[in-house]
Amino acid sequence: MKVPTFKVPGLRRRKGDDLPGLTATARIDRRTKRLTKRLKAGEIAIIDHVDIDRVSAEALVACGAAAVINVASSISGRYPNLGPKILLEAGVPLIDNASPELFERVRDGDVVRLHEGQVYVGDELVGKGEPRTLESVEAAMAEARAGLSLQIEAFTANTMEFIRRERDLLIDGVGVPEIRTRMEGRHALVVVRGYHYKEDLAALRPYIREYRPVLVGVDGGADALLEAGYRPDIIIGDFDSVSAKAITCGAELIVHAYRDGRAPGLETVRKLGQDAVVFPAAGTSEDVALLLCDDKGASLIVTVGTHWTLEEFLDKGRAGMSSTFLTRLRVGSKVIEAKGVSKLYRSRISAGSLLMLVATALITIAVVLYSAPVGKVWLNGLRDTWNGFIFWLVGLFS
């Protein structure tokens, strides 16, 4: 299939020729999350991402990627992941299973030309892949749905393994570190930069203003809080997608480490002159944040951008999705998803009730002024002032 030529701001064409395809600056990184931090509109993203998930696809679209070249399979058939369809529906060409040599033959910032799945640097062919279409993605997703039962079986096996390794943490809270932020009896708001996090944070503004929950940012969720105008109280994660601004904003920092003690994020934090608490645990940073809030006595845990459905667990592409499932079971009585809170909160004071309250207050003031002697004097003075204004106004036009 021929990849159409797109006119996107930032694309560069060679002078004096009519070479077909799309020519633009290439940005290359094996981690999509890291690449989207520096990808600009009109540039071509070269990634190595098996089963592109929804969050990654939405980030690439938001950056304005002119095209995405993936050296891995964007939809492997493990499960019906949503990313490829999101890219194609947004008009972003997707080249799948491209030559792995692209990571050696293309440097970050090179100008490349993409035509019918072939990648050129200058006149040299440096790699090629399979152009994806909506039809091919839909067919692959249908096949993946048919084999979903295999993933359910793997999910069950992962769950049993996680229970064996982390039963002390899950059941008794063994290994949860001491922190200085007080949570006992307070609400906690855990923010992950996931599905619809911006809309959910906007909907929760009245709730945050009244209840003043402890604000917990999970990795990029810390920047999401800052973008929304809030300063996080706690930042927890491996710090691979947290900005320097967030790290130095004054929040308490908790580095999620591997069970063997390795904590790659600790170096990032120390380079910026900050101290951090280390929390070794299996599972995801999102799960660790929920367990921390539960252990420290939060009365309610509100989540933004987290994963709730089986499809979302699978779409995150982690073998450790079982930890997320078990964590929800562990803290389930305290956890509520953001959309539920915003709906419940809005129903507490309706617009009609507010108008009725204002009307009642005005009527009460009027009755007091009319019945009290001082009120009558004040009303008579107000009437005389009004009559004087009317006479003056009539005199202007007579």
Image (cartoon, helix red, strand yellow):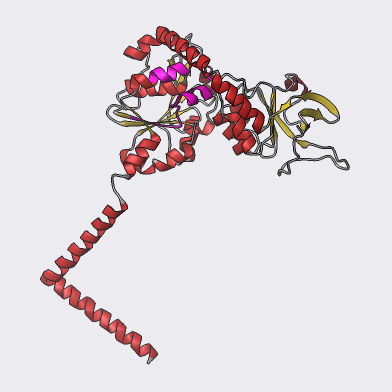
Give me the residue at 49% from left, 33% from top.
195
236 or 357: which is nearer to us? Answer: 357
Rendered location of residue 56, percent (x, y)? 58, 30
Q: Kindly identify the residue that appears in the image at 49 percent across and 27 percent down.
A: 219
For the N terminus, give its image quadrant: top right
- Residue drawn 49% across and 29% down? 247
Question: Residue 81 at x, y = what percent?
Answer: 56, 26
Q: Which residues are magenta?
A: 301-327
Could you tell me if residue 13 is visible in this image? yes
Left/right placement of residue 347 relative to residue 37 reads: left
Give the quadrant of residue 88: top right
- Left or right, 217 with reference to 170: right
Q: Quadrant of the C terminus?
A: bottom left
Place of residue 275 in the rendered image (x, y in percent of width and height, measured from the top left): 46, 22
Say above or below: 88 vs 313: below
Viewer-proximal residue, 371 or 6? 6
Q: Is residue 278 visible?
A: no
Quick one: 106 or 235, which is closer to the camera? Answer: 106
Query: Compared to 171, does 346 lie above or below?
Result: below
Q: Residue furthest bottom?
A: 398
Figure disc tally: 0
On screen, residue 42 above or below 275: below
